[in-house]
Amino acid sequence: MAKVLGIEGSPRRGGNSDLLLDKFLEGAKSSGNTVEKIYACGLKIAPCDETNVCFKTGACRIKDDMVDVYKKLLDADHLVISTPTFFMGVPAQLKCMIDRCQALWAKRFILKEPLRDDEKERYGYLIATAGLNKAEAFIGTKQTIKSLFHVLGLKYKDELLIGGVDAKGDINKDKDALDKVFSLGKGIS
Ligand SMILES: Cc1cc2nc3c(=O)[nH]c(=O)nc-3n(C[C@H](O)[C@H](O)[C@H](O)COP(=O)(O)O)c2cc1C
């Protein structure tokens, strides 16, 4: 069975994307996987300062909570990111985490070093919520997350994009979305 890492991007605990992520992880756990959840907003992660030291070393020179996140990102078999839409993209705290993965990009694509020892197929999932009930609300987020998964060597496996939810807990009215996200998680083996 696999190790599944869930990353929550919203600063609102118990909000829509947080509840969806819990359901996904509940599903993953129900089929025997090990799950772990982290909140981007609960960590101290500085933004990338573009010194590009990582181009030479393959590692970020900033030593903060991201040190531990790098390990978790590479150790997980599969990754699920759950996030609200903020100004057509992801919240700043999650974006800081993603931008800091530039060090992994440098390691892989400039220094040509593998990120992991094995070549196991790893999957990435995206869960996203938005107030706007239109597909356009997710374009920015999808591009960003696809780019992150590419750098991490994850295959963009599946997504659940739910528009038209705004107030905290709105998602609880959408049983279909909660069932779908549970099944997505349950499908991981
Ligand atoms: C700062 C901020 C910016 C937002 N920007 C957008 C946006 O550009 N498009 C949109 O559809 N919804 C936007 N929203 C609404 C949230 O995406 C929506 O309420 C979402 O369900 C919140 O999820 P959460 O409860 O997981 O935080 C914004 C909300 C906030 C607080």
Image (cartoon, rainbow, N blue to C red):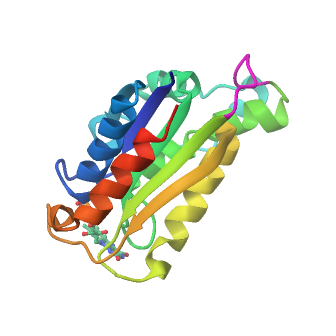
> Does the magenta run of residues contain 4?
no
Residue 179 seen anywhere in this rendered image of the structure: yes
Q: Residue furthest top?
A: 117
Can you tell which quarter of the image residue 108 is in? top right
Residue depicted at 54% across the width and 54% down the height: 158
Relative side of 146 to 110, left or right: left
Q: Nearer the viewer, residue 28 or 151?
A: 28
Residue 47 seen anywhere in this rendered image of the structure: no
Q: Quadrant of ligand 1?
A: bottom left
Q: Is residue 76 above or below residue 82?
A: above
Q: Is residue 17 above or below residue 85?
A: above
Provide residue 116's location: percent of width, then percent of height. Answer: 70, 21
Provide residue 188's location: percent of width, then percent of height. Answer: 50, 37
Q: How many marks can you see? A: 0
Residue depicted at 69% across the width and 33% down the height: 121
> Does the magenta run of residues contain 116?
yes
Q: Is residue 16 above or below residue 33?
A: below
Provide residue 136's location: percent of width, then percent of height. Answer: 49, 81
Q: Nearer the viewer, residue 149 or 52?
A: 149
Relative side of 32 to 166, left or right: right
Can you tell which quarter of the image residue 124 is in? top right
Provide residue 4's location: percent of width, then percent of height. Answer: 46, 30
Q: Which residues are magenta?
A: 114-121
Residue depicted at 28% across the width and 78% down the height: 164
Q: Main secondary structure of the magenta part?
A: loop
Residue depicted at 48% across the width and 41% down the height: 187
Relative side of 86 to 107, left or right: left
